[in-house]
Amino acid sequence: MILDRYVVKQFFPVFFAVLAMFILLLAIIDIFVNLPRYLTYEVAVLDVFRVTAFYLPKSFSYALPISLLFTSAYLLGDLYARNELTSIFASGIPFRRFCRPILIIGFAASVFSFFFDDLIVIPTLKMKNDLSNILLRQRRSEFQADIVVRARQGRLTYTVDFFDAVQQNLIGVSIIEQDENGKFISLIRAHRATWNGQHWVFTNAVIYDWTEDEGFLRYRNFSGSNEYREEPDIFRRNLVNVEELGFRDAGFLARDLRDLGLPFQDALSSYHHRFSFATASFVVTILSISMGGRFRKNILLMSLASSLGAAVTFYVIEMISMMMARIGYIHPFAGAWFPIFIFIIAGMLLLRTAKT
């Protein structure tokens, strides 16, 4: 339809200009936030630009929703100010029909955002973080202390004083084995356990096991066994940054943490948020056009201000719900999707009642 083509033609030049402005702004903010440390460690200008280049996809991901919001609000406000919408409405075209191309753009941006984040943003963000750590003399810890891991559907419980992920050593390890009914079978205690590629090799180990016939707890030296094959990765789950994993790997991480009896709410919340965050472009587009059709004076300014206010409210509520999900007050799925459902419904209702 001619009207749809006209809306798209008016939309994209403004959108690309606003998007470029926000990407540049975010990149400059990142540089200035880290500038004191760059100067402290005498980082070369070329290396700073390399870090910034790796950060540009993440800046694009952050800038996409807010650019759609500002473009939608600006476009509607500008068309109102020039009385073009008055002519369109006088011809019998309702506001909802006029905004259909903008809604389609917002929905397409959400679908694009999900795959762009998973395929482009996550790898480049990891490269940016790794390069920054090297340039700023920072190193991610490869060590953990006070670990408790459950394996084999809870029949084995590992408690480890210290785990060295580099040497793949467990220091101060205890292994409690129970049967399917939770009845105690044995306790192994060792000063050290070393991964040989197939199973754990114990040093200075003893075993306590219950003798059914004699009816007492037996204590003896433990020479080792090849049946303890839980891989070292299960002891370093908390060292993994879920933000640097694709959505499939993030889901596997959350599942593994839950199966091992480790805190999993944060990882599961991030997994669900990976999907819900992609819909932010569609949500803010709905909010923008639903607010843009409600003013008759100072149209451009009021459209921008109301759209921005609605978007800020949305992000604040999302932040609170995600925080509650991460600490276990609400289910991770609810924490990620509750604001989305609420604001989509509210935006649709506002759009339905918009005056034409």
Image (cartoon, rainbow, N blue to C red):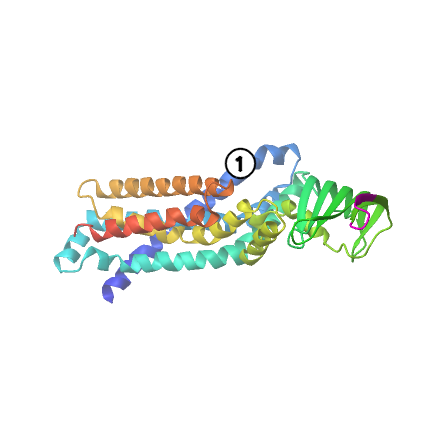
Q: Amino acid at mark 1?
A: Phe
For this view, does 275 lie left or right of residue 169? left
Magenta stretch encompasses residue 24: no
Magenta stretch encompasses residue 213: yes
Magenta span of residues? 212-218
For this view, does 8 lie left or right of residue 141? left
Circle 1 — which element? helix
The quarter of the displayed image where residue 188 is located: top right
Residue pointed to by mark 1: 32
In the image shown, does 202 or 10 lie closer to the viewer? 202
Q: Is residue 312 visible?
A: yes
Residue at 23% in and 57% down: 96
In percent of width and height, residue 21 lies at: 42, 46
Up-down relation of residue 198 to residue 42 (above or below): below
Q: How many marks?
A: 1
Residue at 36% in and 56% down: 106
Residue at 58% in and 56% down: 252
**From this viewpoint, which residue is outermost toward the bottom?**
1
In percent of width and height, residue 91 lies at: 13, 60
In the image shown, does 63 or 309 lie closer to the viewer? 309
In the image shown, does 338 or 285 lie closer to the viewer? 338
In percent of width and height, residue 295 lies at: 20, 43
Q: Is residue 18 visible?
A: no
In percent of width and height, residue 104 lies at: 33, 60
The quarter of the displayed image where residue 1 is located: bottom left
In the image shown, does 349 or 292 lie closer to the viewer? 349
For this view, does 193 lie left or right of residue 274? right
**From this viewpoint, which residue is outermost toward the left?**
90
For this view, does 154 lie left or right of residue 200? left
The crowd level at tag 1 (other Cα within 10 Å; few <14, some 14-19, many 20+) is few
